[in-house]
Image (cartoon, rainbow, N blue to C red):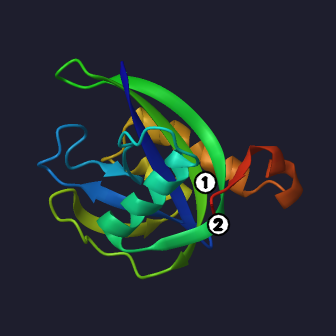
Amino acid sequence: MFFINVEGAVYRGDKWLMIERSRKEEHAGGMLSFVGGTVDPEGASSNILERTLRRELMEEVGIKVQEIMTYVRNTSFVLPDGREVVDIVFLCEWKSGEPFPKSPDEVEAVHWMTTDKIVNHPKTESYLHDNIKEADRLRNLPKHSTNEQETNCSR
């Protein structure tokens, strides 16, 4: 069985919201990351991925994003203890709130960074390079080109 994790590639202007994960974190402690977290079981539910991501953004860094989220990509990985994770990234536009490390056990620092700075930063993993490049590509597409990948999370 997989654990499901969602992450937000949150942008404001030409910069991305990045966190330095707490060194206490089991996976990628101290590394740069998008904000995200594990989906909790809810039984029969709708828009669970989007609601989870909105909750994580508020809990970890205190921000809100616009209603429309665009699917970016998904990957899987295995944690050191053998648990398997499916990770799903969504493109999100910042709406309100000034991000800060609201949950210090999960987030050590918050940064707004350009794509180039993220890709060239020593604390980025290869999967983040791929995620940010695809999110950047989607962000720069004409608005109508991403419609079939968009999801409205207002429900």
* Depth check, front residue: 92 or 23: 92
* Depth check, front residue: 114 or 105: 105
Element at label 1: strand
Q: Which residue is mark 2?
A: 67
Image vertical order of residue 144 relative to residue 94, above or below: above
Q: Given this view, does label 2 or label 1 mark the residue nearer the observer?
A: 2
Instruction: Name the kind of residue labelled 1 in the image.
Output: Leu
Q: Quadrant of residue 62?
A: bottom left
Task: Name the N-terminal-most of marks 2 and 1.
Answer: 2
* Depth check, front residue: 58 or 114: 58
Q: Which mark is residue 38?
A: none
Q: What is the distance, in whole Å, between disc 2 and disc 1 at their CAs? A: 11 Å
Quadrant (top left/top right/bottom left/bottom right) for the C terminus: bottom right
* Residue 86 screen position, x and y as percent: 44, 29
Residue sticking out furthest to the right: 144
Q: On the rendered structure, is 9 left or right of 1?
A: right
Image vertical order of residue 79 relative to residue 30, above or below: above
Instruction: Name the kind of residue labelled 2 in the image.
Output: Glu
Q: Quadrant of residue 142?
A: bottom right
* Residue 46 screen position, x and y as percent: 58, 46
Label 1 crowd (10 A; few <14 / some 14-19 / many >=20): many
Q: On the rendered structure, is 139 left or right of 128?
A: right
Quadrant (top left/top right/bottom left/bottom right) for the N terminus: top left
* Residue 149 screen position, x and y as percent: 74, 44
Residue at (31%, 64%) from the top-left corner? Answer: 60
* Residue 16 screen position, x and y as percent: 51, 63
Residue at (33%, 60%) from the top-left corner? Answer: 19
Q: Which residue is mark 1?
A: 91
Residue sticking out furthest to the left: 24
Q: How many marks?
A: 2
Image vertical order of residue 43 relative to residue 150, above or below: above
